[in-house]
Amino acid sequence: MTTLRESGCAIYVPFGENTRSDLVVEVGGVLTRVQCKTGRLRDGSIRFSVCSTYGHHRSPTNVRRDYRGQVDCFAVFCPETARVYLVPIEELPARSAAHLRLEATKNNQRVGIRFAADYEIGRVAIERLRAPVGA
């Protein structure tokens, strides 16, 4: 939320449980529904889920639900890079994990590759908690 606010967005937080978007941001009078995800650095890519799971609910009809038609983009925070990425949903696969590449592929492929730098909107200062000396 801090990164979006610092980039000039007005931020609205949906009220109630189980809303499909985590935030609504406004830029220039346009409202955008945002789903927040944590990405994990794996094999040179930031990976994040583009669906939610409902296996813990009693008798779920669908264990996995995508966000198509319910959000406009994903805001992805990656603790390993301390960066935030804003990725439009139409650029992602529907029911699986998505990847943002940090490094070039070994064969220099560019078609079909989403580079993290193209979606980066900010960095987050993370202060590590340390035990006091002598504790």
Image (cartoon, grey):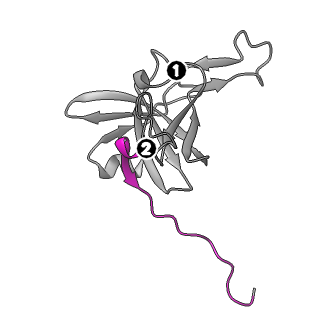
Nearer to me, 93 or 113: 113
Q: Are marks 1 and 2 in contact (CB under 8 Å)?
A: no
Which quadrant is home to the C terminus? Answer: bottom right
Q: What kind of residue is marked 1?
A: Tyr
Residue farthest to the bottom? 134
- Identify the residue at horizontal 25%, vertical 28% (top origin): 30
Q: Residue at x 49, y 33 (%)?
A: 22
Q: Is residue 108 left or right of residue 54?
A: left
Instruction: Give the Cα distance between marks 1 and 2.
Output: 21 Å
Q: Tell me if residue 66 comes above or below residue 37 in the rendering.
A: above
- Badge number at residue 25: none
Q: Which secondary structure is most common in the magenta stretch?
A: loop
Q: Amino acid at mark 2?
A: Ala
Q: Which residue is mark 2?
A: 116
Res 90 → quadrant: top left
Q: Residues within 10 Å of mark 1 (few under 14, many from 20)?
A: some
Give the residues in magenta.
116-134
Q: Is 132 in the magenta?
A: yes
What residue did someone put label 1 on? 67
Q: Earlier in the sequence, mark 1 or mark 2?
A: 1
Q: Position of residue 80 (x, y in %)?
A: 56, 56
Q: Secondary structure at mark 1?
A: loop
Q: Position of residue 76 (x, y in %)?
A: 49, 41
Question: At which x and y percent is residue 44?
Answer: 56, 48
Does 55 appear above or below 81?
above
